[in-house]
Image (cartoon, rainbow, N blue to C red):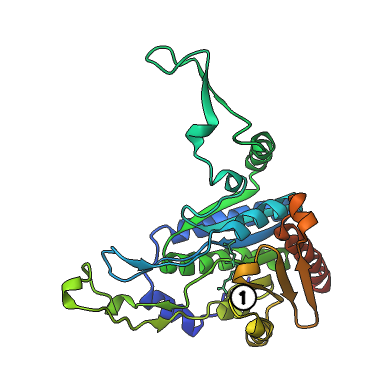
Amino acid sequence: MAKPRMSSIDGKLAEEFAVPAHVEEVKEKMAAFAGHHVTAGRRVVLITSGGTKVPLESRTVRFLDNFSSGRRGASSAEYFMDSGYAVVFLHRHRSLYPYARMFSNINMLDALKFSGGDGASGNSGEVVVNQQVLPDIARALKRYQEVKEGRLLLPIEFSTLSEYLHLLKAAAQALSAIESKAMFYLAAAVSDFYIPASEMPEHKIQSSNGPLQLSMNMVPKILSPLVKDWAPQAFVISFKLETDPTILLDKARRALDAYRHQAVVANVLDSRRGYVVVVTPETQAELIISDEDVKNDVEIEERIVSNLTSAHNKFITQQGG
Ligand code: PAZ
């Protein structure tokens, strides 16, 4: 197997972003997971999901964060597994999680009740689920258990930007061995700015010093080495979020020109649950959820995944896989 090329970003990552202690162990796990599933005839998708935390102090009290809930990544993971993929789910700690996401707004204690007892000492009976409070719990639990038994989901957590960057690099290198059968679905909302460790104060920033002015560096564009060096044969999808719809498609096309990957899923903050555009070098597909779809619980991720799994099929055939 060819040795992965070193890019200038590799150096920057090593120097300016703390390497998580478990990165090599996680990389081995991801490589074994991918190898196992490809041997079993499956494809493997690496999904990134949720926002990143950017510390302002090295003994972190404060940090910058963003809006992302992780819903896009968590629901897409479910549709990918329904489509026969195994999923490496690289997600922000405590962001939404496949199957459990549907119940994230519910207080579990409101959904449970005693049966045959009152919870007093020695008389707890059984605790049962009130399915009126968790309406779809049986279906979600069944599918979750099937996924667990089939070991179709490999969850990996990150919190900080540094963890995200190193774990994504490890994932790309781990999945490169399965070549075109790997898909990268980069839905996480990753900070574009950070404070390098060398410039970060150690202790809590003191308000007694007056107003705070921050100068932040640009986060290296990790898509570039991912596509060129780390997993050059993989099918790579990035996401582009804007708040101004008039610049969205132009930015998506510019990303495709710059990084030469296969597609960009373009979305606007306020309409992201109902409208996205999948942009490729040759095509542009609008995916829309109507009011009728909403009534029938159809989610836009089902359409995104269907569009991309078809494109991935074609890609694999073209690559002779
Ligand atoms: O996580 P979520 O479901 O709340 O939002 C999804 C999203 C908007 C973060 C995703 O669709 C996306 O566009 N990610 C890339 C964001 C960016 O341009 O950095």
Q: Position of residue 142 (x, y in %)?
A: 68, 36
Q: Image quadrant of residue 85? A: bottom right
Indicate the amino acid at tag 1.
Answer: Lys
Splitting the image into 4 quarters, where does residue 64 fall? bottom left
Please identify the residue farthest to the left as the structure is shown: 208
Q: Residue at x 37, y 77 (%)?
A: 16
Q: Is residue 265 above or below residue 144?
A: below
Q: Secondary structure at mark 1?
A: strand
Write the residue at 75% across / 50% down: 295
Where residue 179 appears, as percent x and y from the top left, is 69, 68
Q: Is mark 1 within 8 Å of ligand 1?
A: yes
| Residue 176 appears in view | no
Can the viewer see residue 303 in this picture? Answer: yes
Quarter assignment of residue 208: bottom left
Where 146 sits versus 12, above or below? above
Q: Position of residue 215 (x, y in %)?
A: 34, 83
Relative image position of residue 320 (x, y in whole percent): 82, 71
- 302 lies left or right of 26: right
User: Disc 1 marks which residue?
Assistant: 240
Q: Is residue 306 above or below residue 104?
A: below
Quadrant in which the N terminus appears = bottom right
